[in-house]
Amino acid sequence: MAGPEATALHYPALLLALLVLGLHTPAAGKTLRFVNLVYRHGDRSPIVEYPTDPNTEKDWPQGFGQLTQIGMRQHYALGQYLRNRYSRFLNSSYDRQEIYIRSTDFDRTLMSAESNLAGLYPPQGHQIFHPGLNWQPIPVHTVPMDDDKMLLFPLKNCPRYTELITETENTDEYKKILMENKDFLDMLSKVAGVPREQLSLNYVWSIYDTLFCEQLHNKTVPSWVTPSVMERMKTLREFYILAHYGLYKQREKSQLQGGMLVKKILQNIEQSLNVSSPTPKPKLIMYSAHDTTIVALQMALNVYSLAPPYASCHIFELYLEDNGSFTVEMYYKNDSSSEPHPLTLPACTHSCPLDRFVQIARRVIPDDWDKECCLPSNHIQIELIIGLASGCCLVLLLLFLTVWLHCHGECQRQGYQKVATGNGDRDNGLNLTGMLSKEKPWDLRVI
Ligand code: PT3
């Protein structure tokens, strides 16, 4: 879904826009110019059950992987918080040109975005379309899961990334963690009913996640699920996340993962500064996604701390400073009851000059994702097809010539000769018409 998002990242254009805007803006204190949010969906039901799970999908009102009412309330509250935070920045009533929302194509993320918007844009005056209904429809855009190269992490079909994970799993640090947790994993494999060889750290995360959801919703859990077992699985989940987005060759992993989202966010910032474009640009872009989206983003920016809780929200704010320069500030709201924490990009200040922000963030942006993932690009595929086709033609031609030369030599050695039919046949480039006009079409002569 392109919407207002289909621009390339043109750094010279961005710098020119900075210059023009900077020169023409009167000094009037710091003003907020653009906001980009990335949030995790709210509380959900488990995604899967583990083999010995006493609970099943039927125990959840809407089945697995669905936003719960707790999740809806979390996002409604976040929407209200955003209404309050941006009360002077956004129009008090919904204006379709000032906001753009994109979600991954999951029920829970789409519904989280809708709950959030219910809190952010309760209808005002003429926007109330049904008396007593304090809600209005607002578009939430998405793309099919298989096409989502921006919000759905880890991004698939990237052989180099798969290779990096294998390399990570072969590091001493990774092996040490597995060694140190061997007895625990043996025990977990038995109680959870998962064959030991299948119990990867990803599987541990999945069991932990299911139990976390079940406990939060007061479902029965087996007696082996003690606080210390939960704590141990939580630590292993953190390690798994670290191993997938950091730990080893973090910059390269980021270029293949979170860098794609960083690129999009820089494009959005650039677009918000594009004064020459006649089309109105959104002041707020929000992305509704997953824990892994926030992890990939924060790892790429080197500001990651812990696995993101439900409805946690990473905030980018672009400010025009009173001296005409632009700065970017990042915040992380990971607790509904407290204000967002300021985040500081390493090697910059919390209020980071835009050009410095771009300079640092660019390091994790892939030049050509397909190429860096070692997937043949379309261009290479076409070249390969043309090369193969030419090669085949050449081989056929050589084969034909060889056979022809062989036959020709053989005929001459054996004293056979093709003769003309008398109706204009040509042989060896000689016109034999008339010479043998009274002969049978093929005549055998001894030379
Ligand atoms: O709970 O945030 C989460 C998970 O990411 C969940 O939404 C999930 O399983 N996503 C799978 C695709 C990223």
Image (tube, rainbow, N blue to C red):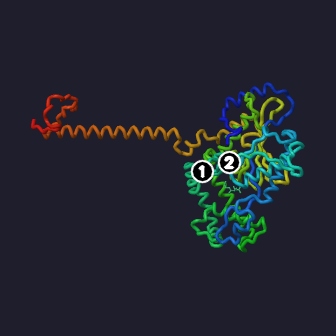
Find residue 156 and name its label. 1
Give the Cα distance between marks 2 and 1.
12 Å
- Name the kind of residue labelled 2 in the image: Leu
Q: Which residue is depicted at the point 78% across and 50% down? A: 114
Q: Is residue 322 above or below residue 216?
A: above
Q: Which residue is depicted at the point 87% across and 50% down? A: 134
Name the residue furthest bottom: 223
How many marks on residues? 2
Q: Give ligand 1's quarter of the image.
A: bottom right
Q: Is residue 276 above or below residue 352?
A: above
Badge 2 residue CB within 8 Å of ligand 1: no
Name the residue furthest left: 446
- On the rendered structure, is 307 left or right of 441? right
Specify the quadrant that holds the N terminus: top right
- Name the kind of residue labelled 1 in the image: Lys
The one nearer the camera, 109 or 348, is 109
In x, y percent, where is residue 420? 18, 33
Badge 1 residue CB within 8 Å of ligand 1: no
Find residue 359 and name its label. none
| Sequence order check, earlier mark of 2 and 1 | 2
In x, y percent, where is residue 141? 71, 45
Residue at numbered disc 2: 151
Quadrant of residue 357 within the rendered picture: top right
In x, y percent, where is residue 49? 67, 66
Q: Which residue is depicted at the point 65% across and 43% down? A: 260
Give the crowd class for mark 1: few <14, some 14-19, many >=20 residues within 10 Å: some
The one nearer the camera, 331 or 46, is 46
